[in-house]
Amino acid sequence: LQEYSIEKHRLDSFDMDPTTLSSNVLCHLCLEIFVLLHIPEHLAMHDGRLKRFILAVREHMYDNPYHSWFHVFDVCQTAYALGLKLGIIDRLGPWQRFGLMTACLSHDLEHPGVSGPFLAQAGGALAAAFKDQILEKHHALRAFE
């Protein structure tokens, strides 16, 4: 994983382009962010469990032009870099760091690539399950499953 070795040193920058990297490398880099934030260490979380969560998120991202695994990684990495640059990360406890990164990873789980109002107007299973804020509720529900 030569790409991983090169890119892990750029995690704190704003010039990463996840679309130039493989999906597997992005998984490794995502895990690296959790490790750099000392989340597994402080929360006594085994790497295997965190790896399975990251892989599950990747597997539940649909292949659409914007709301994809690349977008999810980009949000996660950008939040990490921004948090470091602004000094926010240092003010967060381990559970808050975990919450931030988990929210970044799961914020668009199973996004169908269309808007909530479109889904409401079209009807269907998601619209029937959630009366309002269809996508937001669906993403959150899937994150906790």
Image (tube, grey):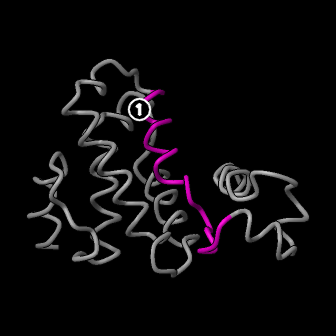
Residue type indicated by callout 1: Arg
Q: Residue at x 35, y 33 (%)?
A: 41
- Horizontal side of 73 relative to 20 (left or right) equals right
Residue 138 picture quarter: bottom right
- Horizontal side of 76 relative to 115 (left or right) equals left
Q: Residue at x 45, y 30 (%)?
A: 43
Classify 46 as above or below 58.
above
Classify 118 as above or below 96.
below
Residue identifier under label 1:
97
User: Badge 1, how many Cα within 10 Å: few under 14, some, many 20+?
Assistant: many
Classify 37 as above or below 93.
below
Classify 131 as above or below 12.
below
Q: How many marks?
A: 1
- The quarter of the rendered structure image containing the N terminus is bottom left
Residue at the farthest top position: 91
x and y percent of residue 92 in the render?
37, 22
**Element assignment for label 1:** helix
Residue 59 picture quarter: bottom right
Residues 144 and 14: in front is 14
Asked whether 77 falls inside the magenta stretch, the response is no
Which segment is the magenta one? Answer: 95-115
Residues 21 and 17: in front is 17
Residues 110 and 32: in front is 110
Q: Residue at x 44, y 32 (%)?
A: 44
x and y percent of residue 119 in the render?
76, 70
x and y percent of residue 88 in the render?
30, 25
Asked whether 103 falls inside the magenta stretch, the response is yes
Q: Residue at x 12, y 54 (%)?
A: 10
- The quarter of the rendered structure image containing the C terminus is bottom right
x and y percent of residue 89 in the render?
30, 27
